[in-house]
Amino acid sequence: MKKLLILGAGGYGKTVADLAAQLGCYGKIAFLDDGRSGENILGTCAEYVLFADPDTHMYPAFGNNEIRMHWMETLCTAGIAVPALVHPRAYVSPMASVGIGSVVLPMAVLNTGVTVEAGCIINIGVLIDHDSVIEAGTHLAPGAIVKAENRIPAGSKIDSGRVVENREYPL
């Protein structure tokens, strides 16, 4: 069974670990972190190369979009698999797509024709209506709503409770 090594053991890292455990597809879940130590923290983020093998996926669990995308690029360039993780209690239309390194948390809805590009955080309770594109490295905070036919720019953060009106960010 595959292993998951999460870079960053903070709040988002713990959220990713919880989600991955619920998916049941990893035999071991551990962390790399630069500022914390503990039983399940195997080293620093820079030591990721020591753990790279075909049976190990890695995920950069940083809430900061720029740092997350930097690590996404570093891991992908090194040939390391970075999974997309979708909570079983999220709804993702069969006509939607979720890019590598993106996380879709509980009660999120990705409607028909939605595209979530690489490295995005689709937090709890986010609603994304039809034919919207969430560009790479974007974070939609808990409860954000993106109405139909929007293209949210790469690296954006849409705060909790914000409603992005239809075509506010035209396709």
Image (spheres, rainbow, N blue to C red):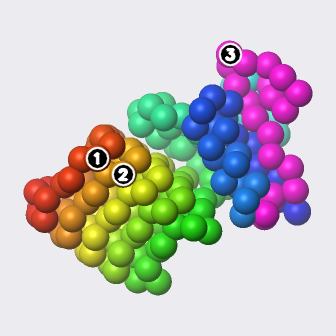
In contact (CB < 8 Å): disc 2 and disc 3: no
Q: Position of residue 158 (x, y in %)?
A: 29, 44
State left or right for residue 21 relative to residue 69.
Answer: right
Q: Do the numbered discs 1 and 2 sit on residues whose CB atoms are within 8 Å?
A: yes
Q: Which mark is residue 143?
A: 2
Please name the predominant secondary structure of the magenta segment in the image.
loop
Give the quadrant of the C terminus. Answer: bottom left
Give the distance between the C-alpha atoms of the residues marked 1 and 2, in whole angstroms.
Answer: 5 Å
Question: Taking 23 as reference, is 143 above or below it?
Answer: above
Q: Write down the region rendered in magenta.
A: 24-43
Residue 47 shown left or right of residue 160 in the figure: right
> Which mark is on residue 35?
3
Residue 80 can be seen, yes or no: no
Q: Amino acid at mark 2?
A: Gly
Query: How many C-alpha atoms fall within 10 Å of the one at disc 1: few (<14), some, or many (≥20)?
Result: some
Q: Quadrant of residue 22?
A: bottom right
The secondary structure type at the circle numbered 3 is: loop
Quadrant assignment, res 141: top left
Amino acid type assigned to the residue bearing label 3 in the image: Gly
- Could you tell me which secondary element the residue under label 2 belongs to? loop
Picture residue at 47% right of the left edge, 40% below the top: 69
